[in-house]
Image (spheres, coloured by chain):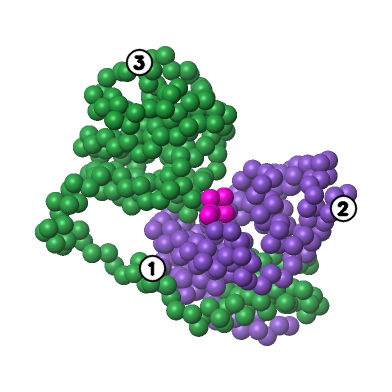
Amino acid sequence: MNPRATTIAAAAALPERRAMALDVESLYRRYGDMVLGRCRALLRNEADAQEVCQEVFLKVHRYRARFRGEASPSTYLFRVTTTTCLNHMRGRRRRPEDPVEEPPAVMVEDSAIAGHALRDLVGRLLKTTDERTQACLIYHYVDGMTHQEVGDLMGLSAAAVRKRIGKFRAGMRDTPPDWLKGGLK
Amino acid sequence: MTHPSTLTLHRMRYGELSADEVRDIEAHLTGCEACSARLQSQLSNRAAFELAPVPDAIRVASKPARSPWRLAGWLVPALAAAMALVVISPFSGTELPGDETTLVETERTKGSNQGARSLQIWLDAGEPTRLAEGASVSPGDRVQLKYRARPGWVTFAGVDGRGVVEVYKAVNTDGSGEWRPAPFSLTLDDAPGEQQFLAVFTSERPDRQAVADALKSGKTVPGLKIERVTVVKPR
């Protein structure tokens, strides 16, 4: 039993549709820690993280009428944050500066890739595959989601996610890049 | 159970999981140091976050918008003269997912190479959404054009509901035929009615004024291949 988790869960309970109806400041106060933390973990640049975090909330606030409650507010924000961060990384001018502590590792079965340092992994994934697959890989290897969870988040079947990840792994196995020490089995 | 994902731990903190799910995770946490550390990291971030001020941009956005009719009188002529679209930033992080299979309906001039060139418009609304021909849009919407082309130049332009033509930017294409985002995004203003976006394809670097004149005249110009997509703002 973890009393911390129980306390927080009880205190935070709020109907999902009502949560998204909050004004942007309330939304920020409630979910900002997750969004900002996600931005820091993926972007590794404090100025970029602050900028993208604000962009996420302003974007979600502007289009809040389109949130139909199919996902929880945190799930929706997590997905939008990931997409916005990846877009930002493709076009950003500032380089990562590693100002933030490396997030604790997430363990997935396929650990040859997941065990790679997060600071290297995200940037390298961006150079190796298409955008949808990049998101699949980050959700799976960085966030520790199962294929089913990734599929639920992205509107794909678990099989489609497995196929994308499998194709990526096959490419890594056949022509392993320098950064993937030891390659894949 | 398997290790809970980062998102699952967040959802637990926010009270979005069922009692059974929370119970399973808590049971897992008692025996998994790594996941307990991940949760602890989230809790530490939360504590630090609560001490930090809310950014000004967020505070301002929370305030109800003022009616445009209450704008000072001297502002009205300036707004009336404003361009239909404002280029708000050079392309940086607004690239949107490609769609390799479907083309928007476009209008082609005679002699254009069917299938080789095309234009799309995407709405950046949390999740990027491709807009169909004639789609409804609203003032303030942020959009991104995407194109594909053979080697040469593509010039992006717009014509608003009042017939005002604006040439945005010319790009030297890589000729790959793959979908590419235009190197800028656009925020729609409040000019009502149809808003056309155009891509003018040329083999050589175009003269902006010549392109603008051609679009204003509405006449077919040899060597200019034009594609367009139209969206509609409420009147």
Which chain comes out green in the rendered image?
B
Separation of residues labelled 2 and 1 (CA atoms): 47 Å
Image quadrant assignment for residue A63: bottom left
Q: Label 2 amino acid?
A: Gly
**Which dot, 3 or 1, sits closer to the camera?**
3
Point out residue B21 in the picture as x, y percentages from the top left corner. Answer: 68, 70
Q: Which residues are magenta?
A: A89-93
Q: Label 3 amino acid?
A: Pro
Q: Label 1 amino acid?
A: Ala
For label 3, the SS is: loop
Question: Same chain, marks 2 and 1?
Answer: no
Q: Are marks 2 and 3 in contact (CB under 8 Å)?
A: no
For label 2, the SS is: loop
Please give the count of numbered marks on the rendered protein.
Answer: 3
Which residue is depicted at the point 71% across and 56% down? A121
Tell me if residue B141 comes above or below residue A20 in the rendering: above
Q: Chain of mark 2?
A: A
| Residue placed under numbered mark 2 in the picture | A182
Chain A drawn colour: purple
Tell me if residue B91 comes above or below residue B4 in the rendering: above
| Residue A100 shown left or right of residue B206 in the figure | right
| Residue placed under numbered mark 1 in the picture | B57
Q: Chain of mark 1?
A: B
Image quadrant assignment for residue A101: bottom right
| Residue A38 shown left or right of residue B227 in the figure | right
How packed is label 3: few (under 14 Cα within 10 Å), some, or many (20 or more)? few
Point out residue A168 in the picture as x, y percentages from the top left corner. Answer: 75, 44
| Residue placed under numbered mark 3 in the picture | B222
